[in-house]
Image: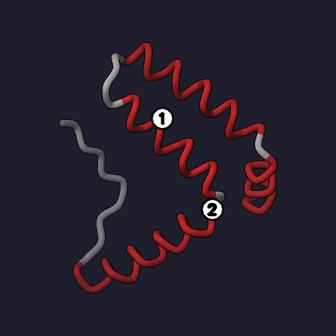
C-alpha cells in the first residue's frame, strides 16, 4: 500500500483542521465528489496506464459540470 501525506498538524490543531476539511468537502457538489471518489477507488485496482485513462475521462466529465465552473470562478 502506498500512502501520500500532504499536510501535518500538531495535536492541538488536528481536530479543527479535520472539521474544516470535512466542511469544505460537504459544501462541494455530491456528484463531483462521488465521481472523484469512484475514480480513486477504481484506480487503486488497475495498472498505471488504465488509471490515468480513467482519471482523464472522469476529469473531463467533472470539468464539464456547471458546479465545476462555479467553483473555479469562486476560486479565481
User: Quadrant of the rendered structure where residue 46 is?
Assistant: top left
Q: Residue at x 31, y 77 (%)?
A: 14
Residue 8, compared with residue 65, is above or below; it is below
Q: Residues within 10 Å of mark 1 (few under 14, many from 20)?
A: some
Q: Nearer the viewer, residue 2 or 39?
A: 39
Residue 24 in percent (x, y) is at 56, 69
Residue 43 in percent (x, y) is at 39, 29
Residue 14, compared with residue 40, is above or below; it is below
Give the CA distance from mark 2 to mark 1: 17 Å
User: Quadrant of the rendered structure where residue 70 is?
Assistant: bottom right
Query: Which quadrant, please, contains the C terminus?
Result: bottom right
Please report contact status of discs 2 and 1: CB closer than 8 Å, yes or no.
no
For the view shown, which residue lies furthest in the bottom direction? 12
Q: Is residue 26 left or right of residue 15?
A: right
Q: Residue at x 30, y 52 (%)?
A: 5
Residue 28 badge: 2
Q: Residues within 10 Å of mark 2 (few under 14, many from 20)?
A: few
Residue 9, compared with residue 76, is above or below; it is below
Residue 15 in percent (x, y) is at 33, 81
Q: Which residue position holds label 1?
A: 39
User: Quadrant of the rendered structure where residue 11 is?
Assistant: bottom left
Disc 2 or 1, which lies upstream in sequence? 2
Q: Is residue 50 left or right of residue 61?
A: left
Amino acid at each position: 500500500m502506498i500512502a501520500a501525506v500532504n499536510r501535518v498538524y500538531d495535536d492541538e490543531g488536528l481536530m479543527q483542521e479535520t472539521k474544516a476539511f470535512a466542511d469544505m468537502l460537504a459544501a462541494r457538489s455530491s456528484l463531483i465528489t462521488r465521481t472523484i471518489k469512484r475514480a480513486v477507488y477504481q484506480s487503486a485496482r488497475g495498472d498505471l496506464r488504465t488509471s490515468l485513462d480513467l482519471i482523464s475521462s472522469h476529469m473531463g466529465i467533472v470539468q464539464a459540470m456547471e458546479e465545476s465552473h462555479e467553483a473555479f470562478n469562486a476560486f479565481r
